[in-house]
Amino acid sequence: MKAEAGTSESRVGTLEAFPSRVAYFYDHDVGNYYYALGHPMKPHRMRMVHELLIAYGVHEKLQVLQPPRATERDLTRFHSDEYIEFLRRITPETAQKQLDQLQRFGLFEDSPCFDDIYRFCQISAGGSLAGAARLNRGFCDVAINWSGGLHHAKKSEASGFCYVNDCVLAILELLKHHARVLYCDIDVHHGDGVEEAFYTTNRVMTCSFHKFGNFFPGTGDVRDIGYGPGRHYALNFPLQDGIDDVCYREIFAPIMSRVMEWYQPTAVVLQCGADSLSGDRLGCFNLSLDGHAQCVRFFQRYGVQLMLLGGGGYTIRNVARCWAYETALAAGVVLDDMIPYNPYYEYYGPDFRLRIRPSNMENLNTPSYLHRMMVQLLESLRSLPHTPSVPFHSVPADVISDPLLRKFSAPVPLSDDEHSVCSSDWDD
């Protein structure tokens, strides 16, 4: 089924029932936000993804949900009170009077202050928190929030276009029902904010496949393996320019198979940054659409609860292609290579095809280098004798109260009331 242009605003929450086990979170307002003139991060790309899903008819196979927006209480489950309060009150008009605070909290250069920045953060985090809640209650097997995946944000600092770390917030929520959560990051940039948050625990294992060297954020060395109880629970595969589908598959599958076999997570959060695709404005990898999506396929085979999040991606026509394709993959829908008409149809010219082909760029990842990294990482995994466990404890209340969760499980948009999507007893 193909949608007429401009009709998608009524498409959120219009299904009669929820036969699908894939929950897709989308807030209509997310495409309205604008970082700055010439800034590579364009929230408008999420609207392009949504319109492509409508045009292909994939929405008919999804639970299409408008999530509640995260509240201050939700955000301070990880972020500091003073940082969130700063995001609440800062505006472009008042920014020039608070230069010291902007520097302190990281809102300068690549992470600028823009109109309604706090509301944007609420949307991004709200979808990931709501997805975690829905997974926890067994209402879906896969939760998707392409507005999330903002993996660079720190406890009290914006970084790398990211202001609130929805990945960390979602994982904290999943830990209420899951003894072990695996976080896997296929963005071209290292998932430093998430790794840092869980660097000293064995209840979350972080794995990142990223460009390393003279490249933002400059972290993610193969020797960074965690600390204390978290030692060996951080895994980093540093890569060089030009990695292609074949090489990526040859490293990803063996490493992650070993992780799944040994760690045995019951929930996986996959950050699907699309800047690892060939031709990305800021990226330097050479993955095709199928090469990127093979990571989604990999985790689908294990049958664990799966959360798919967005992240980087700065050639926005390819971001839309990628995340629409991976949404369809999660829902079991096969997409035609010819892109159907939609309000952004002209963006996909001149061929108007879904596929993203690799270029002829040189692959600097030599077989000997990849083999050396794989041996080092597999040896690190072998040094861990058993799956970590946690003592029996009562499960904290869910992020959404029972009455609201019942409302949330219905296929209608939520009200704009500020319901917290985090429980008050997380620290119990």
Image (cartoon, helix red, strand yellow):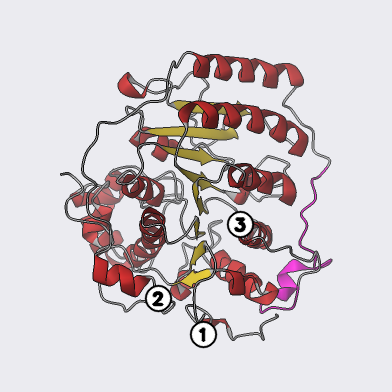
Label 1 vs label 3: CA separation?
A: 23 Å
- Compared with 92, 364 (above or below) is above
Q: Which residues are magenta?
A: 340-359
Task: Please report whichever mark, 1 or 3, sits nearer to the chain's N-terminal start.
Answer: 1
Q: Which residue is mark 2?
A: 410
Task: Please report whichever mark, 2 or 3, sits nearer to the chain's N-terminal start.
Answer: 3
Task: Please report whichever mark, 2 or 1, sits nearer to the chain's N-terminal start.
Answer: 1
**Residue beneath the point at 59% across and 86% down:** 7
Q: Which residue is mark 3?
A: 330
Image coords of residue 128 (percent x, y): 41, 57
Image coords of residue 303 (percent x, y): 55, 46
For the N terminus, the quadrant is bottom right
Going by the image, does 86 lie left or right of 24? left
Q: Secondary structure at mark 2?
A: loop
- Compared with 12, 240 (above or below) is above
- Compared with 140, 197 (above or below) is above
Dot 1 crowding, Cα within 10 Å, few <14, some 14–19, many 20+: few
Q: Secondary structure at mark 3?
A: helix
- Amino acid bearing label 1: Ser
Residue 349 within the segment the image draws in magenta: yes
Examine the rendering and report whether any part of residue 213 can be seen. Answer: no
Dot 3 crowding, Cα within 10 Å, few <14, some 14–19, many 20+: many
Q: Which residue is mark 1?
A: 10
**Residue beneath the point at 75% across and 39% down:** 245
Label 2 vs label 3: CA separation?
A: 21 Å
Label 2 vs label 1: CA separation?
A: 16 Å
- Amino acid bearing label 3: Ala
- Compared with 290, 28 (above or below) is below
